[in-house]
Image: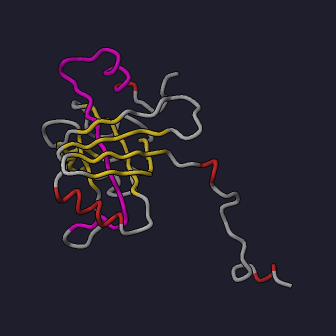
Amino acid sequence: MTDATLTEALKEAYASAPSDVTILHTLELRHPSFVDASGKKTAIRVVRDNINHKCKLESTAPLDANKTVEFVAMAFDLQLPPVETVPVPEITLSLDNVSTELIQYLDNAIETQDMIEMTYRPYLSSDKSCPQMDPPITLVITDIQVDVLKITATARMMDIGNKSFPSENYTVKKYPGLSR
């Protein structure tokens, strides 16, 4: 089954593998506790390459929408979820040679109940003006292991089957007409 979220340029790059164009696989990790030195919300952004890249985010990005941001070069491996109808697609991610700064962000995230969100965006080295996938894949990290050499994480798409419907809670405080 083909993936309708991929741009024609990315499909062509996958099919023909031109020598002058590489696919830049990027990851963005977000959590409410990720803040920079000035106290501003930030994200961990990495690219699977040996040099840093500045790429423009999509207009619907949860953080820094429509801005050009830097993705830091880092070795990582991930297997994208299959394009099929499985109940909850799941991937495994491993980041090698992690810095102490990254581990510090993760330590801060562990202390809260909020989940770490991960967004995968592919770019072409010839066109970094927008991700080559619309919309990019966003997953939630459900399990994470950290050691001195690497981080291994399991991420899943939102489990819509286990969400309550309707998602609004009808309480007496909010709807006084419910009480007799």
| Residue sitting farthest toward the right | 180
Judge whether 148 appears above or below 22 on screen.
below
Does the magenta portion include 27?
Answer: yes
Given residues 11 and 32, the one toward you in this image is 32
Residue at the spot x=63%, y=55% of the render?
163
Given residues 95 and 4, the one toward you in this image is 95
Residue at the spot x=70%, y=83% of the render?
173
Does the magenta portion include 16?
Answer: yes
Judge whether 6 appears above or below 19 on screen.
below
Given residues 134 and 52, the one toward you in this image is 52
The percent position of residue 32, horizontal first and vertical second, equals 37, 66
Quarter placement of the C terminus: bottom right
Residue at the spot x=64%, y=48% of the render?
161
| Residue sitting farthest toward the left | 51
The percent position of residue 18, horizontal first and vertical second, equals 23, 17
The percent position of residue 101, horizontal first and vertical second, equals 18, 59
Judge whether 16 appears above or below 6 on screen.
above
The percent position of residue 143, horizontal first and vertical second, equals 41, 51
Stretch of the chain drawn in magenta: 10-36
Left or right: 124 as drawn, with respect to 168: left
